[in-house]
Image (cartoon, rainbow, N blue to C red):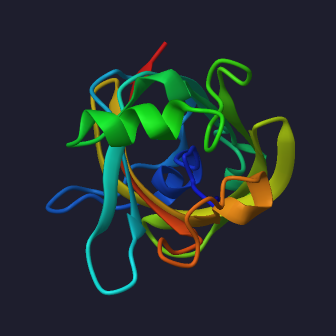
Amino acid sequence: MRIAAMTFVLLPALLCASAPQAAAPDLAQAAGTYDISGASQIRFTVDQVGGGGINGKFTRFAGRLRIDGNSVGASTVSFTLYPQSVATPEQRMADFLRSSAVFDADTYPTVTFRSTAVRQTGDNTAIVDGMLTARGITHREQFAVRLQGLKGKTIAFNVTGDVYRSRYKMDVGTPIYLNVVKFDMDIRGDRR
C-alpha cells in the first residue's frame, strides 16, 4: 500500500497555490492548523487482471495539517484511517477486507500516516513524503497533492498515491488482484 497519501499529504500545495478565478493565497492567508473534516472522501481501487477489481472507501478517519506561514517545507500532516470503516459495494468484500487476511482490523484498528517532508512542485501542487503504518508495519510512502480551493476557514485538496499492499502483508489474491492500491482522496480541512 504505497499510498497515499492517504493519506494525508494535503498541506503544502495550498501554501502558494492558485484557485481558479481567484488570487493566489499567500502563506499568511493559508497558514494555520486545520482539522480534516468528515466531509472528506477517502476512495481506493485495486485493479483485477482482465478488468474489474475492488472499489471502496473509508468512512471513518481523522487528521490534522499545519501549514507553516514562512516555509512550505516546514508544514506537517498527520492522518489516521480506521479499517473497520472500510466500505465496498458488496458487504462480503468489505468483511473480507476487515478480516485477518487483509487489514486485520480487530488486531490493528488504525492505519496512520505522518509526514516527514513537503515539497512544492507547482503553483498549486506538492509532494508529501511520510511514514505509513498498517498492520504494525511502517514504510515510507509518497502522495501528490493539488490545492482545489481556500475559502474562509476551509481548505480543499485532492490527494493521490499508490501503495504496494505486499509491503504491509496484505497481498492476498495476487496476482489476480494487482499489488497496487490506488488512492484518490478529496480532503477538506477546517481551520482551528
User: Is 142 displayed left or right of 162 in the figure?
Assistant: right
Res 32 → quadrant: top right
Above or below 20: residue 153: above
Query: Where does the N terminus fall, quadrant-wise?
Result: bottom right
Res 29 → quadrant: top left
Name the residue at 66% across, 25% down.
110
Name the residue at 62% across, 59% down.
172
Q: Is residue 33 visible?
A: no
Above or below 135: residue 166: below
User: Is 18 displayed left or right of 73 in the figure?
Assistant: left
Residue 20 image position (x, y, % from top left): 19, 62
Q: Is residue 102 visible?
A: yes
Name the residue at 48% across, 71% down.
177
Residue 171 image position (x, y, % from top left): 65, 61
User: Is 148 displayed left or right of 15 in the figure?
Assistant: left
Name the residue at 64% across, 39% down.
69
Above or below 5: residue 150: above
